[in-house]
Image (cartoon, grey):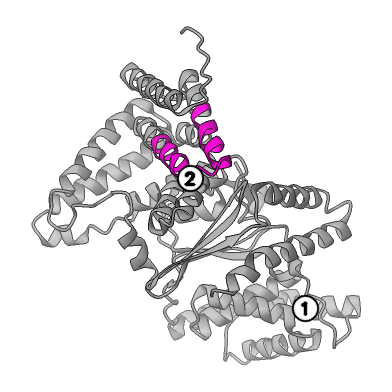
């Protein structure tokens, strides 16, 4: 292929660039190849430069139009990619353009367009997987389309198996059949928009009970869009620039990576980062309103393996260290263990952003489950209340609370081995360190702020255990606790 140099500066040259990109994508699709293409990469880079130039000149209309063209182009390319790896490689080439486009739309008072742009442009792979795997097609069976229902379910399962085997020929064949099945489903009344990109009406419906908040950063500043059933409220976050955020992330990661050699600096940096975010983000918002987990026997469960699972859990709590950290190579796609569990079928996930403290995490998890299971709070509010409790209660109040939990356990009133474990650990730790009763030794954000919730907030509460199940659970856990006490 002949080397080309694409240097365009004016609007007419920008149109020529778009024409060249269209031709290159057309040649790429006709060739039948997948993966990266150097000619298209060069053209995409120049087109991205066009967005940045228009953004710098505050030519919001041209910036948004250029993004729409890039978005259309990348969708054409993604439509023929077979593996997740290839899709991630292409999406990496347009990182940041979604935020620029949404920012430009808000500058033009097109709030709904900005929200739709963000919803469609961020976490594309996760959204695609969730929409494919969790489609509610049960009504098809009651309207004479049982065969279509089972055909869709079979091809989705075949798609998962082909992805797991990384067999490109099988993937191509299965994807073609799945696309045909989706097209047939759209012919059924009521399913005309099945597997289509979300429109604003869909987004607003999701905000009927709880507001949705979209937050973005650009070189010109940050922006939050609060979507309520009454409408959209923009909140300008002038200090939340891409440069400022990158500097904070760089300092945070450096302190975290050296936390074992310099724990005081890590604690100080964590507090500075949360304080910074609180000042420039939360204060403003409050005004209008191949990672892996170490398992037993020193074995590992990778995110790639999680993505191939088919789970039906209501709530997954990943209380180990760093289970909620997203990848840095593709931040717009939110690749993390939490996202992997969502894609695998879990309704909601609690995960951590840093290496957590054993004791404070035990206290937090027990209180979280108390609020969720016993007081029937939704997961977000249960986690929030548990964090406040860990932060604000004194050492004595914590000891007294878990002493009551342990007494309840031994009296058979409340079989909760986790609470008993925490009580034993808390009592032993306080005795060893000679904590002051009136002090709050876990008030630093390090001890309670690492955990966040991702997913569907209305996770069903567990059904009450039968008495027989309670007796069996209590007998096994009592033996375990008696062993620890001795």
Task: Please give the residue where the numbered disc 1 appears in the rendered image.
Answer: 426
Label 1 crowd (10 A; few <14 / some 14-19 / many >=20): many
Q: Secondary structure at mark 2?
A: helix
Q: CA distance from mark 1 to mark 2?
A: 57 Å
Percent across and percent down for residue 281 are: 64, 64
Percent across and percent down for residue 263 are: 86, 58
Left or right of residue 398, residue 93 in this image = left
Q: How many marks?
A: 2
Task: Residue at 38%, 58% (x, y): give it.
Answer: 112
> Which mark, residue 60?
2
Q: Which residues lie in the magenta part?
A: 46-71
The answer to which of 410 and 253 lies nearer the viewer is 253
The answer to which of 239 and 347 lies nearer the viewer is 239
Percent across and percent down for residue 24 are: 39, 19
Q: Secondary structure at mark 1?
A: helix
The answer to which of 194 and 166 lies nearer the viewer is 194
């Amino acid at each position: 292929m002949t080397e080309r140099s694409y240097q365009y500066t004016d609007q007419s040259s920008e149109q020529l660039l778009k024409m060249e990109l269209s031709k290159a994508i057309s040649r790429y699709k006709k060739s039948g190849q997948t993966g990266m293409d150097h000619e298209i990469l060069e053209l995409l880079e120049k087109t991205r430069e066009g967005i940045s130039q228009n953004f710098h000149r505050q030519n919001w209309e041209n910036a948004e139009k250029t993004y729409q063209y890039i978005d259309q182009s990348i969708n054409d390319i993604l439509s023929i990619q077979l593996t997740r790896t290839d899709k991630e490689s292409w999406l990496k080439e347009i990182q940041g353009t979604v935020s620029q486009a949404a920012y430009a739309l808000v500058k033009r008072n097109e709030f709904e367009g900005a929200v739709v742009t963000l919803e469609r442009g961020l976490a594309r792979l996760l959204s695609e997987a969730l929409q494919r795997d969790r489609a509610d097609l049960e009504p098809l069976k009651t309207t004479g389309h049982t065969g279509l229902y089972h055909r869709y379910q079979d091809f989705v399962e075949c798609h998962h198996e082909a992805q797991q085997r990384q067999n490109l020929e099988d993937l191509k064949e299965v994807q073609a059949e799945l696309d045909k099945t989706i097209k047939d489903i759209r012919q059924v009344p009521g399913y005309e928009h099945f597997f289509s990109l979300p429109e604003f009406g869909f987004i607003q419906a999701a905000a009927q009970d709880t507001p949705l908040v979209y937050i973005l950063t650009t070189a010109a500043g940050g922006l939050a869009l609060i979507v309520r059933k009454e409408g959209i409220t923009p909140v300008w976050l002038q200090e939340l620039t891409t440069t400022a955020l990158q500097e904070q992330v760089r300092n945070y990661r450096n302190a975290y990576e050296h936390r074992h050699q310099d724990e005081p600096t890590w604690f100080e940096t964590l507090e500075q980062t949360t304080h910074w975010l609180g000042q420039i983000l939360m204060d403003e918002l409050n005004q209008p309103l191949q990672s892996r987990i170490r398992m037993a026997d020193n074995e590992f469960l990778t995110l790639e393996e999680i993505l191939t699972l088919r789970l039906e859990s209501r709530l997954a709590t990943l209380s180990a260290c760093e289970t909620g950290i997203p990848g840095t190579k593709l931040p717009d796609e939110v690749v993390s263990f939490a996202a992997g569990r969502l894609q695998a079928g879990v309704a909601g996930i609690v995960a951590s952003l840093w290496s957590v403290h054993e004791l404070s995490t035990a206290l937090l998890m027990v209180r979280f489950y108390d609020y969720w299971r016993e007081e029937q709070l939704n997961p977000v509010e249960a986690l929030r209340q548990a964090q406040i409790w860990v932060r604000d209660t004194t050492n004595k109040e914590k000891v007294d609370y878990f002493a009551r939990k342990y007494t309840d356990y031994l009296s058979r009133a409340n079989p909760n081995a986790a609470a008993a474990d925490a009580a034993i650990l808390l009592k032993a730790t306080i005795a060893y360190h000679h904590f002051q009763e009136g002090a709050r030794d876990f008030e630093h954000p390090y001890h309670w702020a690492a955990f966040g919730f991702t997913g569907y907030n209305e996770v069903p509460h567990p059904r009450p255990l039968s008495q027989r199940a309670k007796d069996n659970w209590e007998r096994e856990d009592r033996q375990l606790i008696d062993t620890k006490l001795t």
